[in-house]
Image (cartoon, grey):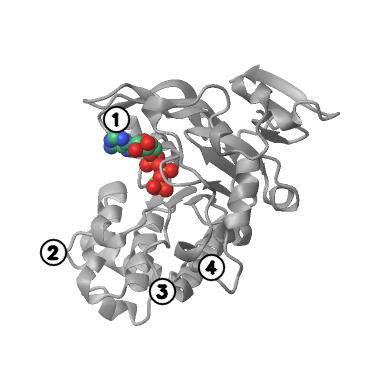
């Protein structure tokens, strides 16, 4: 999946993460996932719960849970393969070259430390700054992420801040060491709808201003539409479709992507909970169906779907589905 000579900021190549739960069979929670992300661009990973989005981003940071490991593939970050990198090498990258924002700021912030000190600590650790100098930078960062009266907010504890402000603190922390790549895993799910929009706008603005790559994980196609340059749709650990955001929304190819779009809220109805979902469930890892993993839920499934679908390349997009295998420009990559 090379795009010429320039080294992309991030190139995930055929990444497979296998989990071996203590009670149960081992399974690939991420299976041969590939995508690229360039500086200043936003790539969205989208898909239902449990499809492997978080594990993909955790793998980039070398933070997969103990029961898991990367069994194949490469994670090229600025040309360096982070899959299999030493813990010491990963620690230099994590929080410094790569920033991260998670879903629930309350679990990521230390409740007994003042937020200013927590953000300062990142710079003290990575940049060996003194506390006072670090705090001065925190004020500037807080200002950049839109925290009002930053000098005063420094002294607050997490519980004294609203959810939106806490997430701004998390973003300030992620930006503290001027990362070139930001991983944001459902950064707005825990927030009110109006605040969600503000936080997303902030992420986008910071990514643009800083020329950072942004890997944004979401289950919300509305968020994808407003943020992404390119999109990877995941289903049961596989990336079943990958395309530019423009192409994806203009013409979704995978029946799963189309299903997600049909169940996506319109702009004036953002309450996901009340929307029709795709019928059926994501298969459980121990009982994967034969052939295409989406087959049991797919209205367009036919006999051939009992065989694993090929990866079909159509120009610069890809889809894992038999429906497109006969398209005139289709280039079939090996069976999955
Ligand atoms: N620590 C863990 N122990 C056991 N199974 C895990 C663990 N972490 C993830 N899994 C499993 O790996 C699969 C992928 O999980 P992952 O967290 O990446 O999904 P996700 O797409 O981020 O879902 P969500 O939208 O709910 O956050 C799921 O089947 C999940 O149950
Ligand atoms: Mg997740």
For marks 1 and 2, give the CA distance: 28 Å
The quarter in which the C terminus is drawn is top right
- Labels 3 and 4: the sequence-earlier one: 3
Foreground disc of the pair 3, 4 = 4
Tell whether circle 4 marks a residue whose Cβ is less than 8 angstroms from ligand 2.
Answer: no
Q: Which label was assigned to residue 87? A: 1
Task: List the single residue furthest toward the top.
Answer: 334
For marks 4 and 1, give the CA distance: 33 Å
Q: Which residue is mark 3?
A: 143
Foreground disc of the pair 4, 1 = 4
Q: Are marks 1 and 3 in contact (CB under 8 Å)?
A: no
Residue at image position (41%, 72%) is 192
Is label 3 in a helix, a strand or a loop? helix
Foreground disc of the pair 3, 2 = 2
Q: Residue 94: x percent and y percent?
A: 36, 42
Q: State whether residue 204 appears in this view.
A: yes
Q: Residue 166: x percent and y percent?
A: 32, 68
Is label 1 in a helix, a strand or a loop? helix
Is label 2 in a helix, a strand or a loop? loop
Q: Which residue is mark 2?
A: 112
For marks 2 and 4, give the CA distance: 29 Å
């Amino acid at each position: 999946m090379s795009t010429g000579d320039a080294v992309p900021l991030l190139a995930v190549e055929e990444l497979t993460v296998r989990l071996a739960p203590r009670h149960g069979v081992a399974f690939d929670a991420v299976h041969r996932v590939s995508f690229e992300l360039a500086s200043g661009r936003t790539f969205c990973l989208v898909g239902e719960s449990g499809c492997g989005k978080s594990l993909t981003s955790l793998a980039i940071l070398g933070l997969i849970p103990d029961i898991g490991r990367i069994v194949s593939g490469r994670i090229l970050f600025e040309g360096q393969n982070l899959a299999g990198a030493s813990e010491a090498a990963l620690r230099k990258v994590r929080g410094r070259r790569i920033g991260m924002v998670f879903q629930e700021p309350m679990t990521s912030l230390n409740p007994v430390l003042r937020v200013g000190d927590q953000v300062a600590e990142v710079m003290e650790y990575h940049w060996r700054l003194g506390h006072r100098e670090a705090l001065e930078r925190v004020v500037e960062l807080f200002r950049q992420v839109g925290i009002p009266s930053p000098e005063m907010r420094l002294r607050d504890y997490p519980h004294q801040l609203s959810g939106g402000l806490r997430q701004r603190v998390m973003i300030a922390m992620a930006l503290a060491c001027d990362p070139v790549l930001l991983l944001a895993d459902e950064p707005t799910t825990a927030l009110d709808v109006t605040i969600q929009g503000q936080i997303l706008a902030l992420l986008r603005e910071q990514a643009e201003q800083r020329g950072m790559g942004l890997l944004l994980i979401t289950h919300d196609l509305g968020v994808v539409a407003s943020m992404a340059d390119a999109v990877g749709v995941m289903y049961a650990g596989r990336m079943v479709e990958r395309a530019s955001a423009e192409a994806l929304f203009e013409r979704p190819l995978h029946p799963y992507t189309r299903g997600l779009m049909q169940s996506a809220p319109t702009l004036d109805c953002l309450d996901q909970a009340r929307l029709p979902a795709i019928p059926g469930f994501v298969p459980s890892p121990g009982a994967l169906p034969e052939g295409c993993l989406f087959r049991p839920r797919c209205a367009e499934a036919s006999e051939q779907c009992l065989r694993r679908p090929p990866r079909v390349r159509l120009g610069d997009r890809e889809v894992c589905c038999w429906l497109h295998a006969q398209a005139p420009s289709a280039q079939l990559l090996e069976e999955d």
